[in-house]
Image (cartoon, rainbow, N blue to C red):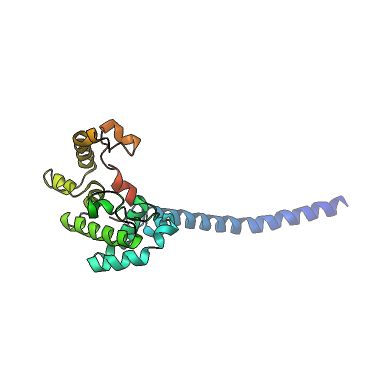
């Protein structure tokens, strides 16, 4: 009985030796595929991330307006920026409310004058197209100007002509110092308090590109 037991045990051990190498090879292949896939997803073509990865983070409320955004972007001749405008809307409102593009101020100078989502999209896309043209196609400058207003483009043009984070901070701090007596402005981000830059959102560009980064 003892001999039979030992013989059976040797057979199991031999079978394990036969199976183990292929399993290790398959495991290595799948591991390598995962690493390559992960690196591709993070870096893409030199980008931080691809829109296919980010698109899932856009809310259903934003995505429901894709057709309208596309239509008005085509009318303005900026159809290549549809995805960017959807990311902008996500940052502005998440697609919620009657003014999902938060475009009232650009239309009538005050908050709340737009009460129809389609009108908001029409105005928001039009305003972004205007800022993009004034910014000579500099997408980051156009995005920050959507938040700060057109005065930021003039400020940048007088200080090197190219968007930088430092210029966004400086402009915000100057405008806040000028307007803080109105009581209408406060820092939307804690990080901005160290610069006393409480006019608008100094990290608006990064926030929008957090939903879409391909510029």
Of the 4 image quadrants, the one containing the C terminus is bottom left
Res 118 → quadrant: bottom left
Q: Is residue 155 left or right of residue 194?
A: left
Q: Residue furthest top?
A: 194
Res 115 → quadrant: bottom left
Q: Is residue 92 left or right of residue 78?
A: right
Nearest to the observer: residue 36 or residue 2: 36
How many dots with numbers? 0
Q: Is residue 13 left or right of residue 77?
A: right
Residue 169: image location, x then y, percent = 23, 39
Q: Please, is residue 150 above or below residue 15 in the view?
A: above
* Residue 213 appears in the figure: no
Please give the name of the residue rendered at 83% of the width and 52% of the height, measured from the top-left corner: 5
Q: Please, is residue 65 above or below residue 104 in the view?
A: below
Nearest to the observer: residue 7 or residue 79: 79
Residue 48: image location, x then y, percent = 35, 51
Q: Please, is residue 146 above or below residue 123 in the view?
A: above
Q: Residue furthest right?
A: 1
* Residue 16 appears in the figure: yes
Nearest to the observer: residue 181 or residue 208: 181
Q: Residue furthest left?
A: 158
Residue 14: image location, x then y, percent = 70, 56
Please give the name of the residue rendered at 77% of the width and 53% of the height, measured from the top-left corner: 9
Residue 62: image location, x then y, percent = 39, 58
Please give the name of the residue rendered at 51% of the width and 54% of the height, measured from the top-left corner: 31
């Amino acid at each position: 009985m003892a001999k039979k037991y030992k013989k059976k045990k040797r057979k199991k051990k031999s079978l394990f030796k036969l199976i183990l190498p292929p399993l290790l090879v398959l495991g290595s292949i799948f591991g390598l595929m995962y690493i390559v896939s992960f690196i591709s997803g993070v870096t893409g073509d030199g980008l931080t991330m691809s829109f296919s990865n980010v698109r899932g983070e856009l809310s259903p409320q934003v995505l429901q307006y894709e057709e309208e955004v596309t239509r008005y972007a085509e009318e303005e001749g900026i159809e290549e920026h549809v995805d960017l405008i959807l990311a902008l809307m996500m940052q502005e409102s998440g697609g919620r409310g009657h003014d999902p593009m938060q475009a009232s101020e650009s239309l009538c100078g005050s908050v709340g004058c737009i009460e129809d989502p389609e009108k908001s999209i029409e105005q928001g896309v039009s305003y972004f197209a205007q800022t993009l043209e004034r910014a000579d196609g500099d997408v980051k400058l156009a995005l920050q100007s959507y938040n700060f207003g057109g005065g930021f483009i003039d400020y940048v043009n007088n200080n090197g002509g190219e968007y930088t984070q430092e210029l966004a901070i400086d402009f915000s701090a100057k405008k806040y110092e000028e307007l803080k007596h109105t009581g209408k402005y406060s820092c939307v981000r804690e990080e901005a308090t160290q610069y006393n830059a409480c006019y608008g959102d100094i990290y608006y560009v990064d926030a929008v590109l957090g939903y879409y980064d391909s510029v």
